Image: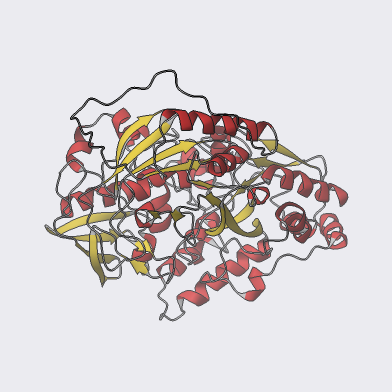
Amino acid sequence: MYRWAVYPRLFLKTRLLLLIGADAFACGGEATSPDTIVEPAEGVTATPEPAKSSLTMLFGVVPTVLGVWGSDSVAGDSLTGPGCTISPVHAVCQDLATDVLTYIDSTTFEVVPLSGTQGWEQVDSNRWRFSLTPGVKFHNGEPWNAAAAKQGIDIQGTESIGQASHSYTGTISGEVVDDLTVDVVCEVDCPILPRSAFLIGFQAPGWWNSASNLERTEKTIGFGPYVQVEHRRGRHIYMEKYEDYVPNPMAPNDAQAPTIDEIFVETRSEALVRATMVEVGEADWAMNLNLAHKDRVPVFKTGGAAETFVLVHDTIWHPELSKRDVRLALAHATDCDLIVEQFYEGLFTCQGTYAPPGTLGATDRTMAQYEYDPDLARQLLADANYDPANSITINVFEGRYPNNVELSEAQVGMWQDVGISGNVVVLETGRWLDVARTGCGRAWREVKGDDPGDSYCLDVPPGPPCFCQPNSFQLNPSLETLDFARALGRMDCNDSGSKFCDPVNVQPLLDPARAARLDGSPSRQELMEQLVDIAYDEAIIYTYFDALVFYGSSADLDWETRFDRRMRPNNWTLN
């Protein structure tokens, strides 16, 4: 959209308030004549500057940080320590200000290079060689080369500060081959490294090395299609297109030169407010709307998320959730089809595994939802010697998914119908993150240091950052790789946030599956299927459905949704 002069903008803001206060209605009056007319000076012809094309994007949450990397000095359990997370609002640092090492095309699902990369090859079982694009410069003019790439790979390949990227790639490091060639070296065999490297972003090393910790959290100086110009906390993030962005013809859907001149990123916590701002022209694009808004916005779109909406159980420390039959009872006591019909107009399909359809390792059996069977649930509770004194809490971050609080309350009601004691607790963001990040790996390291012994976390209390029993909590984990390897972290005794640990039957299976090749013997498919079967039969996580995202946009914006929550506004146009 084009920036309005002040009076039309005030008119729109007034209308916005009226629409939110009641259902939309028109208001207006007769135009008044100005008291004074100012004539232009004779002989002077004003030459107006061409209007900038301007896009306003609305998100529901405020970005935690705007730096794509973390740092040791601010990492650990500080929420601002790791770099920007894989959440949509952090597109500012992941998809606009920088380009990542690889990307996944949303139409073909093939791995493609963006502006900084030309191609790659596997040179050893744990080593991949990447060829970099010549002539690329960071926003501050620093050159893009193998040394700059190595720094980003090293930082984001470290678990303590690599944030979401490490959860896909595992521990990795970079080695300079020549000025435009860099090797990525994995700690273990990494047969699908390019598919999992889509969160490795880069920054100008000279700027980064001299910047303060505060400066590092407030912006990203990358070589992406947009430059971060201004960050006015509580108001907006202002970005301008990068005139020297280098498009890549090998990624025509993701690495085009930007055509929209400027982008304003704003936060409005209420979905109704976001929808109304798009309706009246105060914004061009908004995400995480509700189905109730589909007739309010000019264009309503449904996109993929590469996520499942799930309930993660604490199978380690909770006296009831540690019993498999109790977890199965929770699943069979939940009428997922009714939840979908009641809260989502029947739009979703319930499923049994925390992976998007088509994920390597999932089968028809494990994708099928647990049957709603209250009688079976009661029998399982009896077999497990269930004690209703041990209430089961669903910890909820309100707005993590549309209607998630109401859904949780309905689910607890279904549990109570079969004799399960449960409740819903709505947590603020920081506390919810503490619960989500409290798991087996952090617990045993807190007590045992570097040696987990044979029992890992099974003989220690919950550790940092929560130091509390996590109970159950809602999450919508992503799996953009469509390979179950990343999801194995939720079954891994070494994983910092894992709520499941079986040192004898499961732990020995994890690394061979991660390292397996598609053409291996046994194949990657076979080993992943074995672990998905275990996750399903043990009911370690209850899966509601494959998640979708609801968007609203202006009629003037030409754009397409992706299979995930990522966005590339450099490929969008305003008419």
Is residue 153 left or right of 486 when viewed as pictured?
Answer: left
- Report the number of numbered marks: 0
Tell me where residue 441 appears, x and y as whole percent: 49, 46
In the rendered image, the vertical position of residue 156 relative to residue 67, given as above or below? below
The answer to whether any part of residue 180 appears in the image is yes
Which quadrant of the view contains residue 272? Answer: top right
Of 241 and 457, nearer the camera is: 241
In the rendered image, the vertical position of residue 263 relative to residue 539, given as above or below? above
Tell me where residue 152 appears, x and y as whole percent: 27, 49
Q: Which residue is at the far top?
A: 35
The answer to whether any part of residue 466 appears in the image is no
Which residue occupies 22% across, 61% down? 183
Of 282 and 51, nearer the camera is: 51
Which residue occupies 79% across, 58% down? 338
Which residue occupies 23% across, 55% down? 174
Which residue occupies 44% across, 18% down? 35
Of 442 and 118, nearer the camera is: 118
Tell me where residue 354 appears, x and y as whole percent: 59, 60
- Where, quadrant-wise, is the C terminus in this rendering? bottom left
Is residue 240 left or right of 553 when viewed as pictured?
Answer: left
- Where, quadrant-wise, is the N terminus in this rendering? top left
In the rendered image, the vertical position of residue 110 relative to residue 146, given as above or below? below
Tell me where residue 445 appears, x and y as whole percent: 46, 42
Q: Which residue is at the far front?
A: 42
